[in-house]
Amino acid sequence: MDILYCGDDHMFSGLIISLLSLTKHAKEPLNIYILTGKLHNRHHQFQALSDDHAAFLDQLVKRNGEDNQVTKLDMTAQFEADPPTANINTLFTPYSMLRLYSDLVPQFSDRILYLDADVVCRRPFEDFYHQSLADTDFVGVLDHYGRWFFHHQLKPFDYINSGMLLMNLKMIRQDKLLVRCRDYCRKWPMIMPDQSAMNKLAKHKAFAPEKYNEQQDVQADTVFQHFSTRWKLWPIIHTVSVKPWEVDKVHEQLHLRKH
């Protein structure tokens, strides 16, 4: 199974946890790709995932299967050749948009499962991975909050969270979805650029149950738990962002002790 992550060297701790959770539950060999690069915007100069960290992750996944592997791919040149100009300085780092360059990677097969580094696998996922992708660009789960505020072409409840996407790269390359997304991100500023572009421009997306991208509290049937930002109403309206590597916060704020 082909798995994709995108990010810089600061995501190393998240990758360790996420990859360990995958190898714990996967029944098939994992080809794990990490898109990275030396990117920058007007606020920061980011550092690519280091070769040492990539090598460590490769050895880590091999502990649970010699056929597992981690491959680091530097996308600096591709990103700089076609930067998302209108969205390069948003609250999200440029790495959040690297998945929009997946169609340019010849190593990728016809399907790949994209995961954010703050996604933890809880159960086997082979059936989900191998589902039919006929006439589908990608499969995802509705965004917990965005489904209420964003929709396209007068279709309510069609806004997918991009933290977990099963992508049909064969079809995406044919209909040029990611080419169109990159063009859109270059021209039009958005709140959540890559996620919004994919939702707006995809004509063939499929919806999966929440258990495949649980963005709130983990359930008995949760397959992928996504530690995404939450809104809390008490004592005042505020956001809570707890990541799986922040162990004390996971225990104290989410009351989650199952690992």
Image (cartoon, helix red, strand yellow):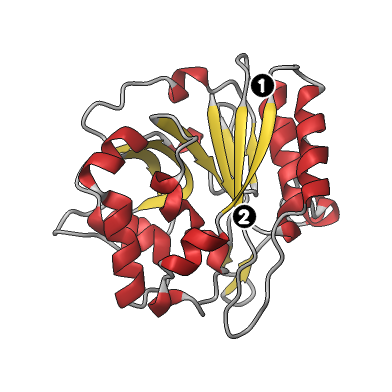
Q: Position of residue 81 (x, y in %)?
A: 44, 67
Q: Residue at x 81, y 31 (%)?
A: 60
- Label 2 crowd bin: few (<14), some (14–19), many (20+), radius 10 Å: many
Horizontal and vertical percent for residue 32?
62, 34
The foreground one among 174 and 223 is 174
In the picture, measured across the screen, residue 242 lies left or right of residue 209, that is right
Location of residue 61 (image quadrant): top right
- Residue sticking out furthest to the top: 27
In front here: 248 or 21? 21
Identity of the amino acid at label 2? Answer: Thr
The mark that comes first in sequence, 1 or 2, is 1
Report the residue marked by disc 2: 36
Q: Residue furthest left?
A: 154
**Neighbours of disc 1 within 10 Å: few (<14), some (14-19), many (20+):** some
Q: Residue at x 55, y 75 (%)?
A: 91
Image disc number at residue 25: 1
Q: Position of residue 191 (x, y in %)?
A: 41, 73
